[in-house]
Image: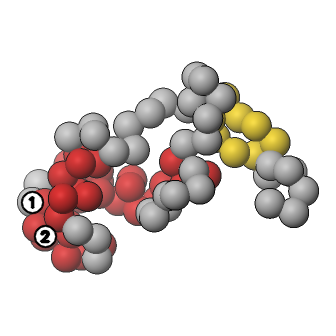
Amino acid sequence: MRVWQTNTEGRRIGQDHPRARYSDGEVAMVWLLRDAGWGYRRIAQKLEMPRSTVRAIVQGRMRCQAVGGHKPKPPGA
């Protein structure tokens, strides 16, 4: 059975959020490349995402909530 990641308030987060544009893997890749010393522009070009999105992820303004639990995914969703 598939489950959704939720925050401490029970709301869906990460790639399970209905308006998510990037997978958890793509966000993790932003962090890996940044830790390797890459700049925002280079990461954005490599992953084909806006530089402002890369910066928001790294600065903790986007995709920064911790997993607080899981909810079962309803059938057909």
Residue pictured at 38% horizontal, 55% vertical: 27
Whether residue 68 appears in this view of the structure is no
Q: Is residue 33 above or below residue 14?
A: below
Which is nearer the eye, 42 or 32? 42
Query: Within the image, what quadrant is residue 8 found in?
Result: top right
- Cα distance in 3D space between marks 2 and 1: 5 Å
Residue with the most extreme right position:
75
4 left or right, relative to 63: right
71 is higher (above) or lower (below) than 34: above
Q: Position of residue 19 (x, y in %)?
A: 52, 58
Residue 54 — which label? none
Residue furthest out toward the front: 19
Left or right: where 21 falls relative to 12:
left
Q: Which residue is mark 1?
A: 39
Amino acid type, label 1: Gly
Side of 62 relative to 40 (left or right): right
When the figure is inspected, residue 15 is found, relative to residue 59, above or below; the finding is below
Label 1 secondary element = loop
Q: Position of residue 55 (x, y in %)?
A: 18, 52
Which quarter of the rendered picture does the C terminus lie within?
bottom right
Residue 13 position within the rendered picture, expressed as x and y whole percent measured from the top left: 55, 42
- Which residue is depicted at the point 60% across and 24% down? 9
Q: Coloring scheme of the render? A: secondary structure
Q: Are marks 2 and 1 in contact (CB under 8 Å)?
A: yes
Residue behind mark 2: 42
Local SS, label 2 = helix
Question: Quick one: 61 or 25, which is closer to the camera?
Answer: 61
Crowd tier of the residue under label 2, counting other residues whose Cα lies within 10 Å: few below 14, some 14–19, many 20 or above: some
